[in-house]
Image (cartoon, grey):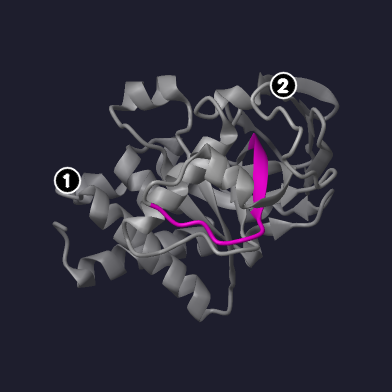
Amino acid sequence: MALSQDTVQALAQRLDDCQQQVRDTTKITDDQPALDWNDAYAIQDALLARKLARGARLVGFKAGLTSRAKMQQMGVEAPVFGFLTDDLALADGGALRHAGLIHPKVEPEIAFVLSRPLRGPGCHVAAVLAATAFVLPGIEVIDSRYRDFKFDLKSVIADNTSAAGFVVGGTPMPVAGLDLVNAGVVLERNGVPVGFGAGAAVLGHPAQAVAELANHLGRHGREIPAGCVVLSGGITEAVSVAAGDSVALSVQGLGRTSLRLI
């Protein structure tokens, strides 16, 4: 790590304050060009600790940068990861206050819920499928705390990969017999389709993102606990949303989930 613990804590507070006060900031690497990958995740961990100290509960994890083409473009070999706390969870069809967000976007995802813990290294798709209780459609709301949604990868990791909210719904389905690779996805905004894709857009198989998460946590002596929700990564490009918008996601074989911005 290039940063001191005091600096890590100060940067976590800066990002936490921005989220709570609904204001943006310049990206961290503008002030800390020596920031490395370990620093970025250390800041994210400190951000989680602040939330837990206020009474939030860890309920899951999320994967980002799960497109092979985007990974190659960014010069990385693995996705990035963030955490999900219960204060980010919305009821199916629930409402999220737009006034509490800076510049929100939504992404369609396939969510995994685990029946038993998963830990790397060496985790793979088959292990993920064997440990999955069921899968669901999921919509993630992302809202970078960085000005004009402009950041580099290390800064976005520190900012918990822009996590701002999520909803899961539809029909919980066991993975046996499902074709998650070819499962079609339609994202709608105000009843108009704005995104189309299939599960293969996530690392060739959405369970691969969960395996990569387990391997990432395993390198730090951690695991994905049983019962956790894991958002496996955006299947289409993120779509901007505004106050008054309704967003719905349909995933072939899994049903539909939705949220509203009020």
- Residue lying at 38% horizontally and 27% vertically, measured from the top left: 71
Horizontally, residue 90 falls left or right of residue 216, namely right
Estimate the spatial distance between the alpha carbons at disc 1 and disc 2, rounded to whole Å: 37 Å
Q: Is residue 246 visible?
A: yes
- Residue position marked by numbered label 1 in the rendering: 33
Quadrant location, the N terminus? bottom left
Residue 183: x and y in percent read 72, 25
> Looking at the picture, which amino acid does disc 1 mark?
Pro
Is residue 119 covered in magenta? yes
Element carrying mark 2: strand
- Looking at the image, residue 126 sits to the left or right of residue 43; the answer is right
Dot 1: element: loop
Q: Quadrant of residue 30?
A: top left
Q: Pinpoint residue 56: horizontal percent, then vertical percent.
A: 58, 73
* Numbered marks: total: 2
The first of marks 1 and 2 along the sequence is 1
* In the depicted structure, whether residue 203 falls above or below residue 262: above
Give the residue drawn at x 36%, y 51%. 121
Where is residue 41 shown, x and y percent of the image? 33, 56
Give the amino acid type for the residue marked by disc 2 in the picture.
Answer: Val
- Residue 108: within the magenta? yes
Using the rendered image of the protein, determine whether residue 143 is visible from the camera's viewpoint.
no
Mark 1 packing: few (<14 Cα in 10 Å), some, or many (20+)? few
Residue at image position (77%, 29%) is: 189
Q: Which residues are magenta?
A: 107-120
At label 2, counting other C-alpha atoms closer than 10 Å, the crowd grade (few under 14, some 14-19, many 20 or more) is some
Which residue, given by chain and number where applicable, does mark 2 sit on? 194
Q: Nearer the viewer, residue 174 or 43?
A: 174
In the rendered image, the vertical position of residue 168 relative to residue 72, given as above or below? below
